[in-house]
Image (cartoon, rainbow, N blue to C red):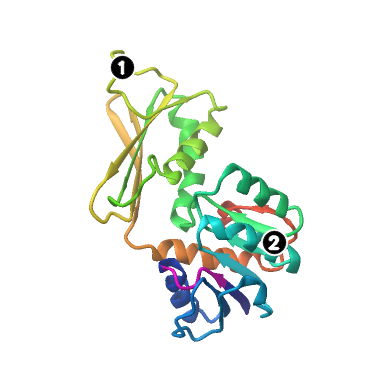
Amino acid sequence: MTRVIMHGCNGKMGQTISGLIAADPEVELVAGIDARDDGHNPYPVFTDIEKCDVEADCLIDFSAAPAVERMLDYCVARKLPCVLCTTGLSEEQLAKVKKASEQVAILKSANMSLGINLLLKMLKEATAVLAAADFDIEIVEKHHNQKVDAPSGTALALADSINEKLNREYDYVYDRSSRREKRPKKEIGISAVRGGTIVGDHDVIFAGADEVITFSHRAYSKAVFGKGAVQAAKFLAGKSAGMYDMSDVIG
């Protein structure tokens, strides 16, 4: 049984993960941490992280960037492994994450979906074959109209996975409107669509002479990210200090 503390328990993802853990016999949510306590959770909730004295095997963080530094201090002090899911961290905060990982296990990934992380592995194998055969590479990502950043972190992670296989020789192109030239070979085009309530769609297109191969991932709810976080917590419990990511979880 993996005992979990949920940091950001009353947020949308925190509540999603609470439900997933309640249905998982291998995991127990022993405490929550949030800026408010509405009294509706079946586990104790602490509004001050320092006052949380509940024994646990791992902490899952789906909070907000300003809360991450205190959370890291808490995990380091208690040698508590952390699945870090909060995004939008500054370079200074990322440096603190790296330093904290020298003392405690931290798992951080651009996308917690098991499907996306399997896709990252598959793309490397496809790239080795298709790029050598002069296939052009394009990525199209789609998200809801409330998402403020573009391209998505997941789209960039997909591009990085491909480019790593290509010795990082390819450039990323986000906008072609100002260009009047043929498409260079060594580039990866990345396009963003924003509209409606799209949770997250990603297509990686390998376009060759007379054939096109497309790898697609569709997220129909945010639960896919919660499921990945729970699997990550099971994996990370008991691990030694260091930086981990979802590729370690899927093996």
Location of the N terminus by quadrant is bottom right
The mark closer to the camera, 1 or 2, is 2
Give left or right: position of 179 versus 62: left
| Residue 44 horizontal/vertical position (percent) | 56, 84
At a point 43% along the width and 30% down the height, the residue shown is: 130
| Residue 203 horizontal/vertical position (percent) | 34, 42
Mark nearer the N terminus (1 vs 2): 2
Disc 2 designates what residue? 73
Give left or right: position of 213 versus 80: left
At a point 72% along the width and 50% down the height, the residue shown is: 99
**Circle on res. 41:** none
Disc 1 designates what residue? 179
Bounds of the magenta span?
Answer: 6-11
Q: Is residue 32 magenta?
A: no
Q: Is residue 8 magenta?
A: yes
Give left or right: position of 205 versus 26: left
Q: Secondary structure at mark 1?
A: loop
| Residue 245 horizontal/vertical position (percent) | 59, 53
Look at the picture and state if 156 lies above or below 24: above
Q: What amino acid is at disc 1?
A: Arg
Location of the C terminus by quadrant is bottom right
Q: What's the magenta bit mostly, secondary-structure-wise?
A: loop
Look at the picture and state if 17 lies above or below 199: below
